[in-house]
Amino acid sequence: MIYIVDNILNYIIYLFILSCGFRLRPRKNKFLLGASVLAVLLAGAFNAYFDTNSPITYIVWSMLSISLFYEERPGRLAVLSAALMYFTGIIDTFSVMLLQIVLIGGGIADTGIAWWMEPAYLISFLVYLLVYFRLLKKNEVFLCDIGLKYRLAILIQGGIFQTFYDFVFVSFNESHAMYGWDAYVVFFVSLAGALYSIFLTLGLAIQNRLSARQNRTLQSLMQMQRQQYDYQLQQSVSLRRFKHDLVNHMGVLRELVNQEKAEEAKEYIDAIWNIQNEFGLKLHTGDGFLDVIINYYQYLAAKEKIEFAVSGKLAGKLPLTMFDLTTLMGNILQNAMESAVKAAVPKIRVTLMEHGKEFFIIVSNSAAQKINTGKGIMKTSKKDRENHGFGLKNIAAAVEKYHGEFYMESIEENGEALFQVSIAVPKESRV
């Protein structure tokens, strides 16, 4: 029975790490899910019948059960299952040693190890929970995000520690009677240090990923600002050219008036008026920073033949800094552009409102098909997920920074699929 319980506990740990750490999705086919559980039970029954604890059996059932349970490439699942069996075996060893030192005071051969293997699994699981809540979930960086070199470093580091402790523990076990309590304390502290070093390596891997993510965010923002600057520079150059020719335009008008060609003069004035209109900001929102962003994306939309409309106006300036406003609206409108251009009738709508103590900004765009928004932050639809998907997180971070709220939904309007982002930001900043 102990072998079946042992397999089930390992199985639960594997599922937890793969689901929460590597973010793998379970299969929808209930038959395959049932087959996965059956593989675990049969492996436990096999070990019980032959009274063996063979690593080969664990490798086979873990690979088979994981491959049946998750939707992922078989090769990757095989590697992950082998790595999990290796790493969880290391943590289990540390947990067993901890229990033997604290509860029993050493001794492998004559203590009946079976009954306290379950508490060892519990200690191991608490370690994984601590890693998940204190490192992974807290930083929104998961095992699937960190570099391969860090994953290998953790596996190698754990293997070195296990080899060392196996050797020390055997020596300690053979002559533990000659050691005092100081030896137990030293062993316990060194064991805690081994676990801490694994946490430290994982923490460094996460910090490296966070730094890379921040660099990509800054590069993206700088690119947006550079594009807006180029747009304003282009407008400025055109305006200088227009002013340079203004004397000539006035000369032509004077000559037309002298010749009493009123109709021609009127047409010429209209032509000049239309030209100068191109240099100003066509859309006015009530916030100077927002005007620059909105007009820039209106310009880009016109180039892509996307209908771009803005309704409403803000009575006051938004409480966001230019940096945060560029991050927020730049990402929203960039995503809207990328989605709208794929639709049969490409269009983007921006609605500005005020109510009570809040500003409201609603951006909707046409989409090729209805999007399943689900709960929380949507995942990027781009194939290169390693370098994309930060826009949605940056939107959420910018809104939360100012204690606002945002909501994303996929709707239908007159039979047409639309994606809509709604943002509410307090008028008074509490940053």
Image (spheres, helix red, strand yellow):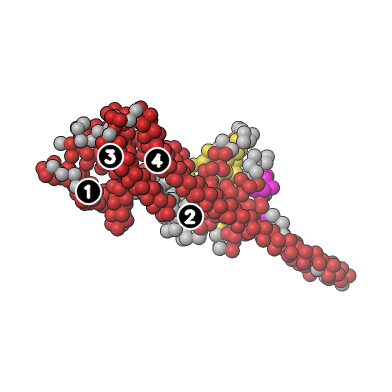
Helix or strand or loop: what does disc 2 sit on?
loop
Q: Report which residue position mark 3 lands on.
A: 170
Q: How far from the left and from the top, in percent, is residue 148?
A: 41, 54
Helix or strand or loop: what does disc 3 sit on?
helix
- Residue 55's disc is 1
Marks 4 and 2, the one that precedes in the sequence? 4
Q: Which quarter of the picture shows residue 227?
A: bottom right
Residues drawn in magenta: 282-290
- Identify the residue shown where x is 28% and y is 39%: 170
Q: Report which residue position mark 2 lands on.
A: 388
- Residue 194's disc is 4
From the image, state whether disc 4 or disc 2 is nearer to you.
4
The CA distance from mark 4 to mark 3 is 18 Å
- Identify the residue shown where x is 65% and y is 43%: 321
Closer to the camera in the image, 182 or 306: 182
Closer to the camera in the image, 420 or 378: 378
Badge 4: how crowded within 10 Å, few (<14), some, or many (20+)? some
The CA distance from mark 4 to mark 1 is 24 Å
- Identify the residue shown where x is 59% and y is 49%: 327
Marks 4 and 3, the one that precedes in the sequence? 3
| Rendered-image quadrant of the C terminus | top right
Residue contact between numbered discs 1 and 2, judged by CB atoms under 8 Å: no
The CA distance from mark 1 to mark 2 is 40 Å
Q: Main secondary structure of the magenta part?
A: loop
Type of amino acid at the residue the image marks with label 4 = Ala
